[in-house]
């Protein structure tokens, strides 16, 4: 086991550190963290519009009229359905902060570049518009790529000194506006050329190209159980050395999984068949039962079956946080980190929980998650109920028992060792 841990440390930790320090991964991670509250709020209103309660639609229609759902789904339309705008604004600010550039100027450039590449539609009488779908899940990868290129292009232009410098007597806001004039002109011209070039191809738009060549294959790959298990192995391996594996894995996989969540939400809102099993809510609420490693079962085992005083006390202290999927007290209190005995179930448990949930949904025992963006602190069972109905809640209960069953024999080993140490210390005190 020690040799295996040494190999993991030599191979995985350097990669993880590089990923965590990568400015683009960091910007993507920060952008999704900053907009997650918006997505959660939009999802709450979507859930209100589609509560699976008998007689609820008829009751709401009698009060608000035939189109009552639109009063609630509009909140989802201005959050989840245009999430790309929020993500690229947050990405632009994050990268601007990293490069110490002017936030407003960078955000303006990124938005202009993205809208240059976003397909528009022409309505009657020559009116132009951007379909909401182009600003949501289907435009997410284009937005991320555009944000990176636009910021780097502006940084290059400013680094070359291609800006208009005003006298010191000119007010700062006016001076800043003129200094961004040339960079913004070049950026818009550059992305307009890209727009023209794509219009001459069979893809017609950059968005169609990115979606077809990059986004769709990644979504299909990210929706597989194999990809989820590999991501979990990497995440748990990093946690094994005290590195926040969830943060690193989310920074890479969150754009894919949140896009799948958005697709499920759109289908749920339209009353259509929900397309994807795996998405961000599957990851957060059907694998992380109690936090990374699915440790809620371990907390319950410690609380009810620990023989040693230290683990009995730690279990009681960890119950509250564990219910809300916070498990640092367990990971660093037992500890799980760098503990050859506890690392075995810590790595195995999320793989088993993912497989059980995936199979349960794929064979129809449990409905697919409905696309509601729940906070990651939503307690298990409640989360399962909100995402997949009573069968989702039941699946969470089963998963807690599975987690407890996997952790039990390994925990009893460390518990017995701790109990023996306590007995020896008590004997020494008596002597």
Image: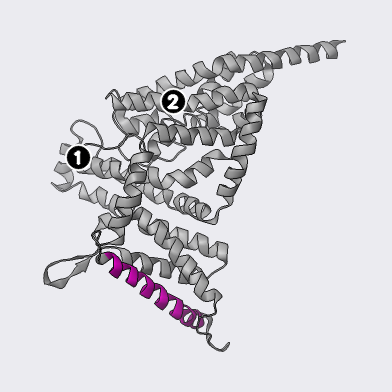
Mark 2 lies on residue: 353
Closer to us: 64 or 407? 407
Q: Position of residue 258 (x, y in %)?
A: 38, 45
Is the stretch drawn in magenta largely helix, strand or loop? helix
Q: Position of residue 75 (x, y in %)?
A: 30, 52
Helix, strand or loop at disc 1? loop
Mark 1 lies on residue: 271
Q: Quadrant of residue 357?
A: top left
Q: Position of residue 80 (x, y in %)?
A: 33, 50
Q: Quadrant of the N terminus?
A: top right
Q: Residue at x 26, y 48 (%)?
A: 72
The region drawn magenta spans 173-198
Instruction: Identify the mark nearer the N-term, 2 or 1.
Output: 1
Q: Residue at x 30, y 68 (%)?
A: 197
Residue 200 in view here:
yes
Whether label 2 touches label 1, CB < 8 Å: no
Q: Residue at x 31, y 61 (%)?
A: 206
Q: Quadrant of the C terminus?
A: top right
């Amino acid at each position: 086991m020690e040799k295996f841990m040494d190999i993991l440390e030599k191979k995985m930790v350097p990669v993880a550190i590089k990923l965590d320090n990568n400015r683009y991964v960091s910007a993507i991670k920060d952008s999704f963290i900053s907009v997650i509250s918006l997505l959660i709020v939009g999802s709450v209103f979507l859930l209100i519009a589609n509560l699976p309660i008998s007689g609820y639609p008829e009751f709401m229609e009698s009060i608000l009229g035939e189109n009552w759902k639109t009063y609630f789904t509009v909140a989802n339309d201005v959050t989840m359905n245009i999430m790309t705008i929020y993500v690229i604004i947050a990405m632009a600010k994050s990268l601007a902060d990293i490069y110490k550039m002017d936030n407003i100027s960078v955000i303006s450039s990124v938005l202009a570049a993205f809208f240059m590449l976003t397909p528009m539609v022409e309505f009657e009488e020559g009116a132009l518009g951007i379909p909401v779908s182009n600003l949501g899940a289907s435009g997410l990868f284009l937005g991320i790529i555009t944000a990176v290129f636009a910021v780097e292009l502006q940084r290059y232009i400013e680094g070359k000194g291609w800006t208009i410098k005003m006298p010191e007597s000119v007010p700062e806001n006016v001076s800043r506006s003129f200094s961004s004039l040339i960079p913004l002109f070049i950026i818009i011209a550059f992305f307009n050329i890209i727009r023209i070039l794509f219009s001459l191809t069979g893809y017609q738009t950059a968005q169609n190209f990115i979606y077809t060549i990059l986004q769709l294959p990644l979504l299909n790959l990210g929706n597989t159980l194999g990809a989820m298990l590999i991501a979990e192995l990497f995440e748990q391996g990093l946690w094994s050395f005290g590195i926040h594996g969830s943060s690193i894995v989310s920074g890479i996989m969150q754009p894919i999984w949140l896009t799948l969540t958005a697709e499920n939400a759109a289908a749920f809102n339209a009353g259509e068949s929900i397309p994807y099993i795996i998405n961000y809510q599957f990851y957060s609420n059907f694998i992380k039962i109690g936090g990374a490693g699915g440790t809620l079962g371990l907390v319950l085992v410690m609380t009810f079956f620990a023989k040693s005083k230290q683990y009995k006390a730690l279990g009681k202290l960890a119950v509250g946080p564990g219910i809300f999927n916070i498990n640092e007290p367990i990971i660093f209190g037992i500890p799980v980190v760098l503990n050859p005995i506890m690392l075995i179930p810590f790595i195995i448990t999320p793989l088993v929980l993912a497989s059980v949930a995936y199979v349960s949904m794929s064979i129809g025992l449990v409905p697919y998650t409905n696309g509601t963006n729940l906070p990651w602190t939503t307690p298990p069972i409640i989360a399962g109920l909100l995402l997949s109905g009573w069968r989702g809640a039941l699946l969470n209960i089963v998963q807690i028992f599975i987690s407890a069953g996997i952790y039990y024999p390994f925990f009893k080993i460390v518990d017995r060792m701790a109990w023996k140490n306590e007995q020896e210390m008590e004997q020494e005190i008596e002597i």
